[in-house]
Image (tube, helix red, strand yellow):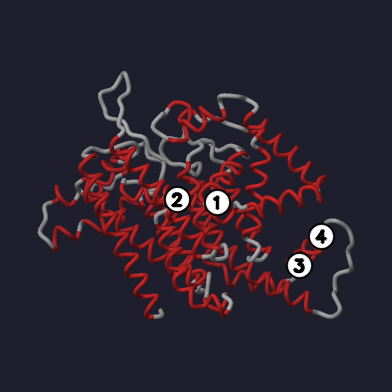
Amino acid sequence: MAQLEGYYFSAALSCTFLVSCLLFSAFSRALREPYMDEIFHLPQAQRYCEGHFSLSQWDPMITTLPGLYLVSVGVVKPAIWIFGWSEHVVCSIGMLRFVNLLFSVGNFYLLYLLFRKVQPRNKFMCSQVHNSNELRVLSTLTLAVFPTLYFFNFLYYTEAGSMFFTLFAYLMCLYGNHKTSAFLGFCGFMFRQTNIIWAAFCAGNVIAQKLTEAWKTELQKKEDRLPPIKGPFAEFRKILQFLLAYSMSFKNLSMLFCLTWPYILLGFLFCAFVVVNGGIVIGDRSSHEACLHFPQLFYFFSFTLFFSFPHLLSPSKIKTFLSLVWKRRILFLVVTLVSVFLVWKFTYAHKYLLADNRHYTFYVWKRVFQRYEIVKYLLVPAYIFAGWSIADSLKSKSIFWNLMFFICLFVVIVPQKLLEFRYFILPYVIYRLNITLPPTSRLVCELSCYAIVNFITFYIFLNKTFQWPNSQDIQRFMW
């Protein structure tokens, strides 16, 4: 690490942790009792803290595996021996919530290491090398305070720990430590079952790298083994033929197996879990039924466009998109018709989305989608633009990397019936890590917007409380 970059990083991390501690104190004063999903997570963690690990002590309303509780006990329990604190203090609500604040520090460091690995210095032009240090640190700071992720650092939810182990697995994958990566992927799976897809993404990253190398070799040959192909989808068909030829080689397949066997083993363990458990979800499955909710992709595209608008939205981009639409109007017409059909036939409204007015998604759905039926169809062009803009921002990555990413994105979010922004955090962070580092001005704009959104979110959560007519409990608005 360059000395100056080290100073920037230390200052950014220290300031972020200081602000986080102040916010944590405000949360602790305002929330002395479990809130929302904490009413399940905190008592379960306290039972583990007291040494009650039997299945009879498991809360059937919890749908994730006990990774959060096991790690929490491993973190807070030593305080009894080191500091002499009582078990009541160590297993308190505040101490358990503080575990996620520690995870947030780890996430900050992992994000920085990932930016250094994904955005190495040699990718920049000579005139940009001097600024690359500041860009990486500023990008790390920006992503660390990404609103939907940052908010859940202060509640006892699985987001912070899930992010930590998934990012750690991705980092180890990029460094070629695939056994460690698969183990960390398993740890992430213990926090949230869908994280198994991001372990598969790590394997896909390895495969994409080898495919890219082979593809470049293929293009460099003077005499192409593949017959010439003409037509509007010539490049696509050429790549498809290449993939078929590549997959027919036993040498290629054995090489990929040797590289990815830890992930394959993890995949077999996951399949065994699904068979034994009778499904992916444990506990209460009635509210977590899988379905083909294709519009979730459109919601994710919109979510990403909103939070990355300094990078994805500009007059020049809109002009380029409109020009491309006119040039390939038949293709875009087909895409539009298919999208309208998917919105028509596969839009679902989960009972939680319609009933729980503590989440922002409740108001988005009520005031945008439910007000006028036609709105969900009128938004289709915006969805297409957002999807195109996201794909365009990833053009520095290989076609095979993009293929792996969008497949994993599809598998993670489409089966989810409930529209909840928390489900978009991990794919968004992985996307944001892999786009080309933008100029400082755009990063400052992005960071400023995140700071404003965070301020508004925390202010509303802490100060704008309300009560339901049939309950005396204090309710708060949140992501």
Q: Residue at x 54, y 54 (%)?
A: 310
**Direction from residue 473 to residue 330 in the image, left or right:** right
| Labels 4 and 3: the sequence-earlier one | 4
Amino acid carrying mark 1 in the image = Phe
User: Looking at the image, is 22 positioned above or below residue 35?
Assistant: below
Count neighbours of disc 4 (C-alpha within 10 A) and say few if under 14, some if 14 to 19, many if 20 or more.
some
Q: Position of residue 351 (x, y in %)?
A: 48, 27
Comparing 116 with 176, the one in front is 116
Quarter residue 290 falls in: top right
What residue is rendered at 47% in x and 43% in y?
421
Disc 2 is placed on an element classified as: helix
Q: Is residue 183 visible to the viewer in this orientation of the structure? A: no
- Which three-letter amino acid code belongs to the residue tagged 3? Met
Amino acid type for the residue under numbered disc 2? Cys
* Residue pointed to by mark 3: 248
Separation (CA) of disc 4 from disc 3: 17 Å
Which residue occupies the foreground of this view, 259 or 393?
Answer: 393
Marks 1 and 2 in Cβ contact (< 8 Å):
yes
